[in-house]
Every structure is written in structure tokens, then in C-alpha cells.
Image (tube, helix red, strand yellow):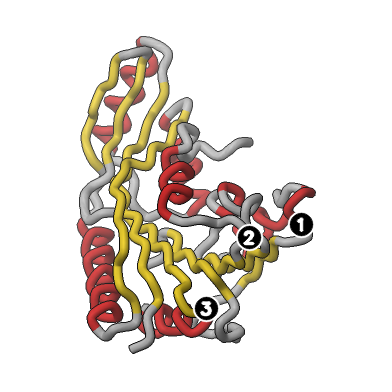
Amino acid sequence: MVHALRRIHGSLRPEGVLLDLHPEPKRTGVEVWQGDLIHRLGHLDQEEDISDILEARARLDLVESDGWYVTERQRFFDLLSHFPSTGAWLDYLALEGYSSGGSAELIASADELLAADSGEVVIREPIRASVLRSTRP
Amino acid sequence: MSSPIDPEGTESAIIHELVDFSGADVLEVGCGDGRLTWRYAEAAAMVLAMDTNGEKIARATGATPASLRSKTSFLVADIADVELSPDAYDVAILAHSL
């Protein structure tokens, strides 16, 4: 990734910016929304993902400390994904090739709620958006 | 089918708050199926978006709106291997790529 960040740097014009969007090292939440009611069912098991995120963040910090970029602004937000059922959610995960899914207990809890009343599965992923200004080391 | 991700437009609002895409030449790395690309490409002058996943790039190419076809290119490529022109872009986006 350090190599990639340096290649991107070389392709940017002077004063160009890199917008980095990646997940926060926190677990993604799984919720069921039914009208105004939000059921927070738990989180995905993502220990490996969180380790990868921390490593990526360290590499970004490294190129910044080497003087290739300087962070100008950051924003933190939750990226929400909405699915009509757990089946639709799991199909989406398979299509996108994601390895992290919900536990059987979590999916059963969501199915039970959605069988009782209409609603949707909502996945809540914390994201950090950073703007890094290209500099000349 | 529309994307199930971010129908609220939170991500879109934040990237436009952080970056001025007006007339910008943009390089997007890890564009996937173009979900994020569509959220800024209208404002940009030119977009080169790449991903290593050929299936996702095929979906992005197929879903490119007619109004964006002349200025948006999708490429199956790894940023570590592809030849990039120096000093060619105003904005680079590293989108959920670790």
C-alpha cells in the first residue's frame, strides 16, 4: 500500500488531494428497523478486518510522516446499507465477496423480528474520510 | 437494482463537503462497481476508475449513465502495476481499499 500511495502521489498535480475512505477499526453493527423502532442486534465478528484496518492506517501514517502527504481534514460517519431481509443481505455479501458475516444467532434474531413484523436489516459501518494534500518530500 | 448502500446519501454529502470535484480530473482506486463514482463524476472533468475485480468493473462499465460515458473510464488494474501519467490528476480517491 505504501508503494500504491507513492504512485498515486506521483500522478497527482501539485496541490492535488487524496481522499481516503476506509472503515474505522470498530465492528460493524447489525440492526433491524421496524418503523421508528431500531433493534440493535449486535456486531459482525471482524477481528481480522480490524487488524487489517489498523495496518492500513499505519501505512498511511508512514507516508504522511515521510512527507508525501499532509492530512487537511477528516470526517467520521456511519455508512448504512439497507436490505429487505437477511437473505438479501447474505446474497449481497456473497456477491461482493465479503468474508465477514453475521453469526447464526444474530441472523436468527433478525429473521425472528422480520417474521413478526415488516422491516429491514440495516448494516452500520463506521467510516473515516480523510483529505490528504499532496506535498513534495 | 439500486445499491442498498447509503440510500441516505451521507457518504455523498461528506465527500462533496471535503473535496471540490468541479472540473477536476479524478483517479479512483478500488472503485468496485462504480457506486461511489456516480456520486461525483457528474461534477468532474474526467474520471479514471480502477479495480482489480473484473466482474465489478464489468458491472460498472455496463451501468455507466450515457451522460458520463464520454468522461468516465473503468479499468481492471492494480494501482501497483498500472502505468500512470505524472501530474495528471487533481483528486485521487482511495475508496475502501486496504
The residue to which callout 2 is attached is B23
> In the displayed structure, would residue B66 be above or below residue B5?
below
Q: Where is residue A52 in the image (x, y as percent from the top left)?
A: 27, 66
Q: Name the front one of labels 1 and 3.
A: 3
Q: Which residue is drawn at 23% across and 59% down?
A: A50
Subunit of label 3: A
Determine contact: label 1, label 3, CB under 8 Å: no
Determine contact: label 1, label 2, CB under 8 Å: no
Q: How far apart are marks 1 and 3 (CA)?
A: 24 Å
> In the displayed structure, would residue A20 be above or below residue A88?
below
The residue to which callout 3 is attached is A13
Subunit of label 2: B
What amino acid type should be assigned to the residue bearing mark 2? Answer: Gly
Subunit of label 1: B
> In the displayed structure, would residue A117 be above or below residue A125?
above
Element under disc 2: loop
What amino acid type should be assigned to the residue bearing mark 1? Answer: Arg
Q: Name the front one of labels 1 and 2.
A: 2
Query: Can residue A88 be seen?
Result: no
Q: How far apart are marks 1 and 2 (CA)?
A: 16 Å
Please indicate whether residue A70 sits to the left or right of residue B37 in the image: left
Q: Where is residue A71 in the image (x, y as percent from the top left)?
A: 30, 67
For the C terminus of chain A, the quadrant is: bottom left
Residue B69's disc number: 1
Number of marks drawn: 3
Q: Residues within 10 Å of mark 1 (few under 14, many from 20)?
A: few
